[in-house]
Amino acid sequence: MKRISHWARGRLVEGGSGRTGPVYDPATGQQVAEVDLASAAEVDAAVAAADAASPGWRATSLARRSEVLFRFRELLDANRKEVAAAITAEHGKVLSDALGEVARALENVEFACGVPQLLKGDHTEQASAGVDVWSVRQPLGVVAGVTPFNFPAMVPLWMCSTAIACGNAFVLKPSEKDPSASLLLAELWHDAGLPDGVFEVVQGDRVAVERLLEHPDVAAFSFVGSTPVARAVYEAGTRHGKRVQALGGAKNHMVVLPDAEVPAAADAAVSAAYGSAGERCMAVSVVVAVGAAADPLVAAIAARLEGLRIGPGTDPEAEMGPLVTADHLERVASYLGVAESEGASLVVDGRRREVGGAGFFLAPSLVDHVAPTMRVYREEIFGPVLCVVRVDRYEDAVALVNAHEFGNGCALFTRDGGAARRFQFEVDCGMVGINVPVPVPVAYYSFGGWKASLFGDTHMYGPEGVHFYTRTKVVTARWPEPATSAVDLAFPGNR
């Protein structure tokens, strides 16, 4: 059985806790590896290594840091197929989705390569007579990230690219469901010339997370996961005096107005709802069909699901792969029975479609006539289940979106520019798409939602990431004039 270990001080290190967890190939349902699960002592060792490496990396020039980042970017680009294959093998998403994940990760690395520009401070000359004032941004020291299974390469690079560029040492605790991608990233950082200890990988479960949250040498903590866990992480981390950004769950709405182009809206809904088997925090979970848009839109989405090819992620023609584990498959499928019992209509029931193989497959489902009181609407499902809520007016759609506890992303499909401008002004969520179903910001903006989708006040990566991983120091200086200036001392004939 393949064993997946930790990365410490520039090399692979086998775990010593005696605890391991299973890693599966979701396409076959077979266990393919065991991952070491760290003890609290092993977390302490990783943090100690990062803490020892931190001063030297902080003292490294911005030019040198940028050089390492550019080299890492080139190595990641050259090895993108290997990283994508590791993602597909343990997560299950199709290779095209995995390659897309690596491409978006590269964008964040490219942003971080501009660290000499990103870390510029401000300067005010002559704030008072003979007094200058300026600000500088300095790293925090050791920072940690806990990342989810659904993007095992992209989300770690959301965090560590910026954190490392800013001069911090980074300790990563990836998901134990698909841990191999984290070790590939560690090898690439090492090959790029990053000093040992600046990037550490601790494989683990709750024991590792809790120790990182309470460790006195961890200054900041980044997290992406479900809302209940994000809330608990935020409370625990801040209680121990840390900066925390904790991204939680989502229930992303896609509002379709009667004037929208139905074929384009249906194509967008299918790709956004069922891509990566719906295991994306930006997946469209709810279509809000306004007025006359409802019937033709539901029919168009249902028709497209019949031809959607489902299979192993390694199948180049597959458009959707399996879910990540058997437990998650069972959980997602259970919502379909609940929805039907609460009065919703199963237009397409993914449980009834045969998918070859013994993997964790669930075909796409489409649930119509969903009411806001139903569990299938209120809760994050995180699978290939798309709900349709019908409303009469634009105002009803906005009220529906704004009333939901989550505020991660939302989209509007329309040909009316006035309605689009009004929507982006009125809707309460952190990321908005206009005729764009998955409005993930480009790397030079920042990613994050509102309400129960974010705990903390700083979004992920981009300019807000630089702010999160640095602290500002303001210097006020006066240099009194000496009785004899340096110039006069150098040139006595001037006197």
Image (cartoon, grey):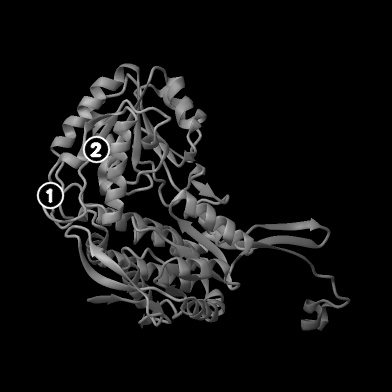
Circle 1 sits on which residue? 317
In this rendering, is residue 186 above or below 444? below
Which residue lies at the image location 27% right of the left edge and 67% below the top edge? Answer: 23
| C-alpha gap between disc 1 and disc 2 | 20 Å
**Residue sitting nearer the eye, 232 or 172:** 232
Q: Quadrant of residue 28?
A: bottom left
Task: Measuring from the top left, give residue 336's x and y in whole percent.
Answer: 28, 38
Label 2, on which residue?
365
Residue drawn at 34 percent across, 17 percent down = 291
- Tell me the quarter of the picture where residue 157 sits: bottom left
Looking at the picture, tell me which residue is in the foreground, 226 or 414.
226
| Location of residue 292 in the rendering, given as x and y in whole percent from the top left corner | 30, 16
Q: Amino acid at mark 2?
A: Ser
Q: Please tell me whether mark 1 or mark 2 is closer to you in this view.
A: 2
Rendered view: 448 above or below 482? above
Q: Quadrant of the N terminus?
A: bottom left
Image coords of residue 9 (percent x, y): 43, 82
Above or below 66: residue 321: above
What is the crowding at mark 2: few (fewer than 14 residues within 10 Å), some, or many (at least 20)? many
Residue 161 higher or lower than 188, as above or below: above
Residue at horizontal 23 percent and vertical 21 percent from the top: 296
Q: Position of residue 332 (x, y in %)?
A: 30, 46
Is residue 165 visible in the rendered structure shown here?
A: no
Residue 368's tag is: none
Decide if residue 134 is on the left or right side of residue 129: left
In the structure shown, which secondary structural element does the residue marked by tag 2 occupy? strand
Residue farthest front in this picture: 341
Q: Disc 1, disc 2: CB below 8 Å?
A: no
Left or right side of 451 for 362: left
